[in-house]
Amino acid sequence: MGMSIVYTILFMVIIGAVIGGFTNHLAIKMLFRPYNPVYIGKWRVPFTPGIIPKRRDELANQLGEMVVKHLLTPESIQKKFLNESFQQEMTKVVQKELEKFLTSEESLEQLMERIGYTDSQVKLKEELDAFLEKKYDQLMDKYRARPLKTVLSDEILEKIDSKIPQISGYILVKGRDYFASVEGELRIDRMVNDFVKERSGMLGNMLQMFLGNVNLTERIQKEIIKFLNSEGTKDLVTTLLRKEWDKVLDWQAEKVEEQFGKEQLVKTVKQYLHKIIRVEQVLSTPISSLTEIYKERIIENVAPTAVQMFGGWLSNRIEDLMKRLHLADVVREQVESFSVQRIEEMVLMITSRELKMITYLGALLGGLIGLFQGIVMLFVG
C-alpha cells in the first residue's frame, strides 16, 4: 500500500512536470508559430497565426518609436559628437585620410575624371571666364560713378606710379631703335623730301645753299637719336605720362568702359588671368606637388579645427537631421521587411537560454503542483 502511494505521487509529479514544461514550450512556440493563419473551411483556427506574426506591424511601429525616443535620441548623439575622445578619434581618421590624399601622385584632372567631371580644362576655363564676367558686372555697378583713383587701391596706384619711369624708358628705347633702323631712316627721308617739295622756290634754294652737300636725312636722324638718348627727354616723357595718368585717374569708371569697351576690358582681364592661372599646368600637376608646401599645416591645424567645427555644426542640427531621416519609419520598414522566420531566429539567438529556463521552470512548477496534488489526495483519501 505504501509503495503504491509513492508511485502514484511520483507519477503525478512526472505528469505535472511534463505538462508544465510542454505547456511553456508550446506557449513560447506560439509566439511565432504558425507563421500564417490556419483555416478549416472558412473558420480560422484560434491563435493562428502566432502572436508576433499577427502583430508584426505593431511590433515594427513600437520598435521604431523605441529607437527614436529611447536609443538614438538627439541628446545622446549630440553628446557623442561633442565627446572629446570621439573627436580625437575622428581627427586621427581625418588626418590619415588627408595625408593619403595630399601625398597622392594623381593629378587634379585624373581626380576630376574619376569623380565624373570630364573635360575639366575646358569647363574650368569657361567657369573662370563666367566668374570674371559676373565679377566685372558687380564691380562696375558698384564703382561706375566713382573716379578711377578712388577705385584702385593705394598699393596699385603706387606700383603704377613707380612703373611710369620704366615705361618712359621703354618708349624712348623703342623710338630710338625705330629711327636707327632702315625703316626709320626711310621715314625721315620721306618727311624731309616732303618738307622741301612743299617749300620749293626761294626757301628751297636757300636751304640747298646753306646745307650744300650735307645729307639732311642723316643729320636729322642723328639729332633725333641724340634727343631720345637725352636724360632730359626721359624726364620730359615721364612728366607728360604722369600728367596724362593723373587725368585718367580722374575719369569715372564708366568713362574707362566707354573708352576701351566692355568686351575689350573683360577680354584683357581674362587673358591676364589665364597667364597667371595656367589651368592646363595646374590640372596636370600631381596633388602631392600642389599641396607640398601646405601639407603639414593642413594635417596638423586644419584637420582638427575642421572636425571640431563639423562636430559642433552637426550636433546643433542633429535633431532636424534625424527628423529628416525619419528613423522611426526606417526601423519600421526594416522590421516589416523581415520574414517571420528571420524575426524568430533573431529573438531565439538573443533569448534562447532564457526561453529554455522558462521551459524548465514550467516543468519544475508542474512537478511541484503534481507533488502537492498527490499529497492532498493522500490526506483526503
Image: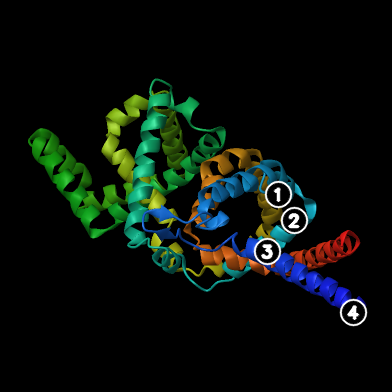
Q: Which residue is mark 4?
A: 3
Ranked by sequence position, the earlier of labels 2 and 1 is: 1
* Residue 81 numbered tag: 1
Q: Is residue 374 above or below residue 219?
A: below
* Badge 2 amino acid: Phe
Of 175 and 300, the residue lying toward us: 300
**Alpha carbon distance from label 2 to label 3:** 50 Å
Q: Residue at x 21, y 42 (%)?
A: 210
Ranked by sequence position, the earlier of labels 3 and 1 is: 3
**Alpha carbon distance from label 3 to label 1:** 49 Å
Task: Bin the neighbour count of mark 4 within 10 Å (Cα to Cα): few under 14, some 14-19, many 20 and up.
Answer: few
* Residue 351 numbered tag: none
**Alpha carbon distance from label 4 to label 2:** 72 Å
Ranked by sequence position, the earlier of labels 1 and 4 is: 4
**Alpha carbon distance from label 2 to label 1:** 7 Å
Disc tally is 4
Mark 3 or 1: in front is 3
Q: Which residue is mark 3?
A: 23
* Secondary structure at numbered mark 1: helix
Q: Residue at x 57, y 42 (%)?
A: 321
For the C terminus, which image quadrant? Answer: bottom right
Q: Quadrant of residue 254?
A: top left
Ranked by sequence position, the earlier of labels 4 and 2 is: 4
Give coordinates of residue 11: x percent, y percent: 79, 74
Q: Is residue 176 above or below residue 165?
A: below
* Badge 1 amino acid: Phe
